[in-house]
Amino acid sequence: MKKWVLVAAACVVVGAFLGSRVMAVEDVSSEEVPEAKVVAVREHCDTIKDELRALQRSDSKARVYLGRYYETIIGKFITPLNVRLVENGLSSTSFINNQNDFNKTRTNFVIDYIEYQKGLEELVAMDCKVEPKKFYEKIVNVRARRAVVAEDVVRFRKLAERHVGLVEELEAKL
Amino acid sequence: MTRGGRNLVILGVASVVVAFVTTGVSLALYHNSGDIYLDRSRPGYLPDEEEIEDEPVEEVYVLEKSGLVTKQILDEYLEAYGVELDAIDAYKDPFTMTVLEDEKLGIPTE
């Protein structure tokens, strides 16, 4: 009974975390869409959708490519180094905080990417000839989600640089 | 129909129902968890030929979790780490915003 209560509590916590992350980007559809844009979407519907499908494929490649290096950096560099530093009494809160930030950013990257791809897939599935206004509003929404993913990538790069700085500082002290 | 025959039919139907339910649950989980968006084995998302071509076997840097920490070790570490960073930087403008701009999609900007 106690085990099931713990499992249920863990599910609630995970769900709340995921839910809070998902609700970070709200639908940005309050502004009126200019008629010229609506007409353009209707006229160029097929071309736009081809561009979006190509974007889905290239984003998928980017995600795999970057994800692989993020995993390598965390799993083969940062974590083993931190463990070794602790063993040698050389660790500091900066190293540990950086590792935690890395892990958090990696998790956020995956969640944000999924939300972005979900939006993109819904966008591609829409019929822009029948609902060009809604389609454009969805483009705006997907743009915002993509921006969040782009921020995660930038954050990762900054954390990776910060780690170099920390290691160089440590090296200077040895 | 004999009792055994009837039971066999019930077993068969129940098995099919259970299979449908479990498959449905799996697909729902696969979709709702977002794993579908990370899956590159879907049609249209399969890796390109250049992505799966054989890469030369290189020595992969490994830092053991235990051992001394010396300047030389940290030097080697930073060198290998730099290679990873260079590889990340080699992918130009990932998730750039320009691809979704109105102009790029053929939509007037005003």
Image (cartoon, coloured by chain):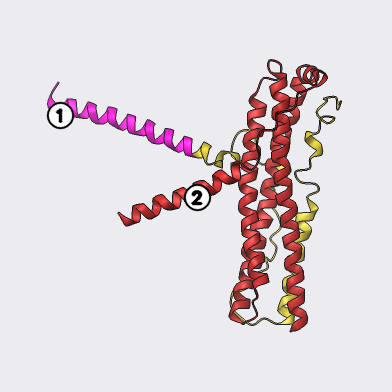
Q: Residue at x 43, y 33 (%)?
A: B24
Answer whether residue B10 is magenta in the image.
Answer: yes
For the N terminus of chain B, the quadrant is top left
User: Looking at the picture, which amino acid does disc 2 mark?
Assistant: Val
Q: Nearer the viewer, residue B45 or A90?
A: A90
User: Looking at the picture, which amino acid does disc 1 mark?
Assistant: Gly
Residue A130 rendering spot, x and y as whole percentages? 68, 15
Q: Nearer the viewer, residue B84 or A28?
A: A28
Q: Residue at x 64, y 34 (%)?
A: A119
| Residue B48 seen in the current view | no
The chain letter corresponding to yellow is: B
Q: Is residue A92 left or right of residue A5?
A: right
Quadrant of the rendered structure where residue B64 is? Answer: bottom right
| Residue A113 seen in the current view | yes
Tell me whether circle 2 and circle 1 mark residues in contact (CB < 8 Å).
no
SS assignment at label 2: helix
Identify the residue under disc 2: A14
Q: From the image, state the color of chain A.
A: red
SS assignment at label 1: helix
Q: Nearer the viewer, residue B49 or A66?
A: A66
Magenta stretch secondary structure, dominant:
helix
Quadrant of the rendered structure where residue B69 is? Answer: bottom right
Identify the residue under disc 1: B4
Look at the image and give the residue range highlighted in magenta.
Answer: B1-29
For the C terminus of chain B, the quadrant is top right
Q: Residue at x 70, y 82 (%)?
A: B70
Residue A166 rendering spot, x and y as whole percentages? 73, 72
The residue mark sitting in front, 2 or 1, is 2
